[in-house]
Image (spheres, rainbow, N blue to C red):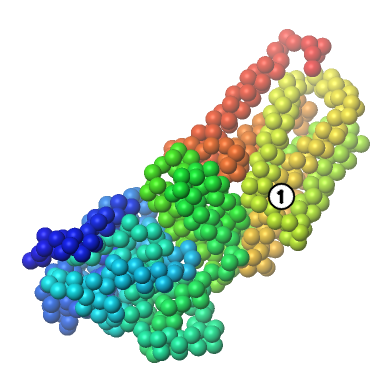
Amino acid sequence: MRPLLRLLALLFAMGLASPALAQSPSASEAQVAWRLLDYVAVDYAGAVANGEVVNPAEYGEMIEFSSQIRTRLDALPANPAKAGLVRDAETLQAAIRNKADPRVVGDQAKALAGAVLTAYPSPLAPSFPPDLSRGATLYAEQCAVCHGATGQADGPGAEGLDPPAIAFADVERARQRSVFGLYQVIDQGLEGTAMASFAHLPAEDRWALAFYVGRFAFTDAEAAEGERLWKGDPTIRAAYPDLAAVTQATPAELASRIGETKARAVTAYLRRHPEAAARPQGSTLTLARTRLAESEAAYRRGDRKTATDLALSAYLDGFEPLEPALGARDGALLRRVETAMTDLRVSISRGAPVQEVEDRVSRANALLDTAERALAPQEADNLASFLGAFTILLREGLEALLIVVAMIALLRKAERPEVLRYVHGGWIAALVAGGATWAAATFFISISGASRELTEGFGSLLAAVVLVSVGIWMHGKSHADAWQAYIRDKLSKALSKGSAWFLFLLVFVVVYREVFETILFYAAIWTQGGHAGMLAGALTAVAILAVVAWAMLAYSKRLPISRFFSLSSILMAILSVVLIGKGVAALQEAGWLDVHPLAWVPRIEILGLYPTVEGVAVQLVTIAILVIGFARTSVPKAARPDAGT
């Protein structure tokens, strides 16, 4: 029987019983389940051998842990992968009850742990290389009393502990333990043991501790050899492209690929020098993590304005440039990152407790880790690049094309071909301006994420306002074929009063907005590889858009003018609702408008529908204006042409 009361008294006497004794309130069921799975994967071999129980106490613990794993996974929030996780947990329970081979149980536990992280992400690595000198100080102050100064579990506080303190210097155990596994135990503690949670420490301190204790089983001589291997063998460096790879790998897994001696050496080096595997400072995801850390720190200081600005920069400057590439590979993950970033900004804006903001930052970092793996160069392929380039250009190009074609058809119906040059001048000027924007952003200046969103947002709102007025006007001129001569005469006079430049401006704004967004997305996709697929996707989209334009122009020629005005007014109305929704969303992302989420509203970008109170409200107001405008401009049957324009 475990003397828990005696352990608690001992911990208080040593000054360790603090907020750390309780499990961190931020620790999710998924994280606890992962930690238990990691424990089972490592320790089951000490409980069962050759189908027989060799350590009854350890085996009882394995039975207990496997039951907790099943219970905790069953309690997780809804997720498409949840049912499969629970089934796998039941399979693991059965294997342990049947005293299955340790390798089988270990493999099952590791596979299930990986699946849990995929479905319910947790931060897999620190945002920056940890400070091991800080880890050494914390270890001496908080851990050495039980685990010993050299990790031998021989400290004065270890006497009488049941179960005994872990010996970090135990080579065989260290082979099976990742830095991430150590971090999870430090973060959450281990129920039923003297190991308390240290969640009260900042995350960077917990990571520093994890790396520090993870080095005890490996010598300085091995670390020196590991440095030589790291610098001289590119295949080893490729195996550890970032800190997340270092924290997740176990020495045993690396040994299966490069041999035991090399694996120990490389592990010894990287756990002493994690900065060797740090992400390049120029990457946008590194910027996102930096801004998130700075935002969290500012919020702790009580500086909500700075925290908000930094959280916005994390999304706009760090993550958004990669959205098109990620969307082409994993659209669901893209939405989860966007939602996490929005939730963080909402928590900051309403002055939520510091712990809630820290949890939001942790969640965002976990999803950025997942996104980084999805965007790894080795994951790039021509199909993903093709789909990304194709869908982006087709989506953005179609909105602009519909408006341009409607303007061209309108001028043809009015028999004003000389005004067409203003429309063509507008879209050509927009393409040239888009190219100049790309060149400037690439070679001369840096366009911030906020600037991008403001350009898109105000461009969308301006175009939407114009389209509302044009749509209502067109609807008023669509009621009878007898109006054809009247409409043509009035339209011809109107266009002779200088409004041709208005058409130029409308076409320019609409097309430039789409070109601007498309260029930025294409630049992000290009950096991810798959260039041939990207070019093929762009050319395919251009071909489809050309066919659509030809078909629309050909069809519009055969339409009676009243029917043309009726369909055009409906098209303008729909596009105005779409654009105004996108404009509001862009201004929200730029931080100009507040965000109040609506969980019950779906996100449908092609319709400009975003699940926020502000976006839905503005779209509903626009629809109401259109309905009223259409009703007021409807012409009764008895009305005469001279009733007004």
- Seen in the picture, residue 126 relative to 434 is either above or below; the reply is below
Residue sitting farthest toward the left: 1
Q: Measured from the top left, where is residue 562 in percent x and y?
A: 75, 25
Total numbered badges shown on the rendered structure: 1
Q: Which x, y percent locates residue 539?
A: 72, 59
Residue that mark 1 sits on: 516
Q: Nearer the viewer, residue 337 or 348?
A: 348
Write the residue at 83% across / 38% down. 504
Task: Residue 70: give x, y in percent of width and height.
Answer: 24, 59
Is residue 409 in view from this perspective? no
Q: Amino acid at mark 1?
A: Phe
Instruction: Say which quarter of the image contains residue 135.
Output: bottom left
Residue 631 lies left or right of residue 190; in this view the side is right
Relative side of 46 to 266, left or right: left
Q: Residue at x 24, y 62 (%)?
A: 16
**Residue at (58%, 31%) from the top-left corner?**
619
Camera-side residue of 377 and 170 = 170
> Who is closer to the viewer here, 212 or 572?
212
The answer to which of 516 and 531 lies nearer the viewer is 516
